[in-house]
Image: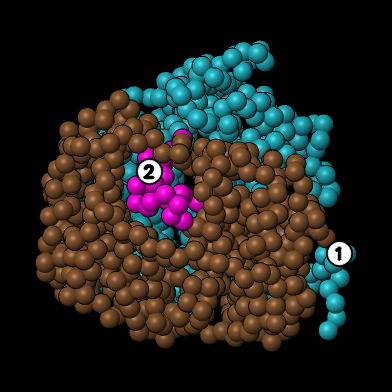
Amino acid sequence: MMAVDRSRLPVSGAARPFRFPSIARTTLGNGLDLRVVAHEAAPVVSMAALVRGGSSADPATRFGLAAFTADLLDDGAGSLDGPGLADVFARIGAEADIEVWPDATVVSITTMARYAERALELLADLLVRPRFADQDVERVRGLRLDRLRQMRAQAATLADRAFTRAIYGGHPYGHPGIGHPAAVRATTADEIRAFHRATCTPQATALVIAGAIAPSRAEALAEQTLGAWRAPAPAAESALASVAVQTEPAARGCVLVVPRPGAPQSELRIGQVSASRLTPDYHALLLWNAVLGGQFVSRLNLNLRQAKGYTYGVRSGFDFRRRRGPFSVHTSVQTTATADAVSEVLREITELADARPVTAEELARAKAAVGLGYPRGFETAQQVARAVAQLALHELGADHFEQFRARLNAVQLDALPAAANRHVQPRALTAVVVGDPDAVGPQFAERGVTVEIVADEEE
Amino acid sequence: MHPAVDIPYFTHTLANGLDVVVHEDRHIPMAAVSVWYHVGSRHEQPGRTGFAHLFEHLMFKGSAHHPDGYFEALQEAGGLVNGSTNTDRTNYWEVVPSQSLELALWMESDRMGHLLPALSEAKFTTEREVVLNERRQNYENRPYGLSSVALAEALFPEGHPYRWVTIGAPADLVASSVDDARDFFRAFYHPGNASIAIAGDVDAADTMGLVERYFGDLPPGPAVLHPHRTTTLEREARLVLEDRVELPRLSLSWHTPEMFHDDDAAMDIAADVLANGKTSRLYRSLVYEARLAADVSAMQASREMSSVFHVVATAVPGSALAALDDAITRALEELAATGPTTAELERATARAEAQFVYRVQTIGGFGGKSDQLNAYNVFTGSPGYMQADRERYARATAQSVASAVKRWLREAPRVALSVVPRGQSVLALPGSEQVFPA
């Protein structure tokens, strides 16, 4: 047998071909956007209903309304109450999930393929026939207020909230999905019913069905369970719906400290309002971010974790949304290194913009890292359903997956700085520190950095 | 049972003792490599806790023929790479485009056979800081984060290998040295204490040949002594831990049988009946109807020597932990007396069966097929143990669940840990002793 050559790493051959999911797309008579993907890897079917709106649709006086409404969908719908629904989900081995994103609410169910019809009937009940019973509204209100209270003790949550508020202010992306206690207290059952009636309609919904199911059968089941869904005539225009905030995001460019006395670490967020999903710079930004902090081997992680040992890990990323989403660096660092970590992050971002731009070698490595592993995101029915739901949310072409690697590889080195500068400006970055003010304050003072102490919001 | 959840495989043991398991799955052009070493924090010595996990970090810092940049090489190939340590085992994995399978095998074999020449004092010292930060982030700076430390210290006596959590005590980490790492590698990191499973877009015969080529010349190591010790509590322990939390939480824990025991499956079913979702007994009584608790959960935490069953509930403002304790105790009494109803047993077994299907959807990573094959191989000696594992759930009856709950949760003492906001020990269960976990 040939001995192993340990003087060099083995050279990989050419990538093997991969067929990205083929999407059968139809529109039901009521306007519902239906996308079906046959995916036979396991005897599983995954379905995701994406309803446009999400937490950015919250009225200004009712932050948290979209999430409160979504939370109640599986608390009684159609002929079943909450425990009744939970019983059926368990019997078909289903995993049901309701998520509220900034731009959409997503109701998803993954189940054994043989139960696809039952699961789709339940999904239709959740979307079309939720009960919103008064006693359920009160119970869920209590649970959400308890959760808001517990979040006050979570450093990561405090950091996310302060960062979002600082960079977005009164913009629809400026509040957390769960909302604020005062608004959760004030929300009425009638407001929830009206919000659901106004926002959850077949025209606003894309349904993705992926898994071990023939497309023709999936389409027939969708027609059978959701074909008769009609948007109810809108009730008298709700007073709440008309006051959605629309202010433009404002970059701040400063260091904010949320006091957490005695905290054993400092939780950091550094970033700004940045790019939307449809930016032509999308692929360039993915590559730029891979170099900066989008993966384990990145300038930020090599510096802060591998070289200095300040943290268990640091990541950066763009949260691409329908409107301009945040770019942020997030990490948790040892208290004594707080100011140093902030200045190192700012230095890395600044140098990427001027003194040490992305090199040709870094770009080639980033293209390989991001592009070669891309098929991994299409392994399970659930992954496929979620990926296709993203296409629907952002109105991307059906060839998006097929074209992804070609578009990535087409990004030129000299295009990177301009693309990055359009969306990340080092001087506009806001840093949020959740940590012990007595320990971190002097560190910033020594460096001549002014910090602003901000309280966690209590509304 | 659904036949589609089978994981057909080929297996072979090399002359140096390395177990090899291969499974073909061509759905995506990726190959998953999983390497398990049968060593975890239970193989550590008191005073050097946390070492198995710290050592896992060092395995990514380079080996003799590739002294820097393990992540770099695999990342550039489009691979994902990670590892984890628990009380019983340490695993390492890559999911790479299938044309880079050899790269992953080269790297795994180089660090299995030739790690030490590349291990320096500087790498050791930096990585120890990283791990200390991991501990602060996930334990000290996380609400209720030190509960697991306090529970381990209360459940297990001095010197018991499960008495410390895998992350280890900060003082022990600080006291450890690069020489400890060298000794640890020689004792535990060799083919005879390892198992490699490969799943995905590969040819089984070719892959067997590649593994022989890359790993066949590594020397076998010394026999490994796997500690085996069980324990019982003599009496209930009531403890209170003050933490940076908003709401008081009660954790109740009992010793239960080891993973793959029939009663381990029965306790899984009991956990489902007690606290999985809106139909469960405790969710209904504590959260849905009475509004005493903000949340409740139950779990059978299965481990190789013995397991622990946990019930955890967080009180809403104004509700007392003693009221939660009463409700939980009543629910356990009822379950021990009459077992689950037919509907409860059907739900629990349907959910357990579905989990087996969901677990075979991916080829690798944490919990994919390669990881599963290794888990069965390392803990039972048979990569194909899944059918036997599933049958434990099919065999469970109302009577067997009732007997297990009675024996392990009703007739044996427990640890009751109250975690309360700082300065409010008065909110703990009466008679609780304050603890300061290491």
Q: Which mark is residue B58?
A: none
Image quarter where the C terminus of chain B lies is top left
Q: Which residues are magenta?
A: B141-166
Frontmost of labels 1 and 2 is: 2
State yes or no: residue B152 in magenta. Answer: yes
Q: Which chain is brown?
A: B
**Chain name for mark 1:** A
**Chain name for mark 2:** B
Task: In this rendered view, identify the residue nearer to me: B149 or B297.
Answer: B149
The 10 Å Cα crowd at callout 2, few under 14, some 14 to 19, many 20 or more, is: many
Residue designated by label 2: B150
Amino acid bearing label 2? Ala
Task: In this rendered view, identify the residue nearer to me: B123 or B15.
Answer: B15
State yes or no: residue B30 in magenta. Answer: no
How far across and down, in percent of the image, does residue A374 sit?
A: 64, 62
Picture residue at 51% right of the left edge, 16% below the top = A438
Image quarter where the N terminus of chain B lies is bottom left
How far across and down, in percent of the image, does residue B437 sit?
A: 41, 39
The quarter of the picture where residue A84 lies is: bottom left
Picture residue at 83% right of the left edge, 60% below the top = B65
Q: Main secondary structure of the magenta part?
A: loop
How far across and down, in percent of the image, does residue A459 sit?
A: 32, 24
The 10 Å Cα crowd at callout 1, few under 14, some 14 to 19, many 20 or more, is: few
Dot 1 and dot 2 residues touching (CB under 8 Å): no
Are tags 1 and 2 found on a single chain? no
**Chain A: colour as depicted:** cyan
Picture residue at 77% right of the left edge, 38% below the top = A417
Task: In this rendered view, identify the residue nearer to me: A237 or A310.
Answer: A310
Residue designated by label 1: A8
Q: Gap between marks 1 and 2, in whole Å?
A: 48 Å
**In this figure, which colouring scheme has been used for the structure?**
by chain
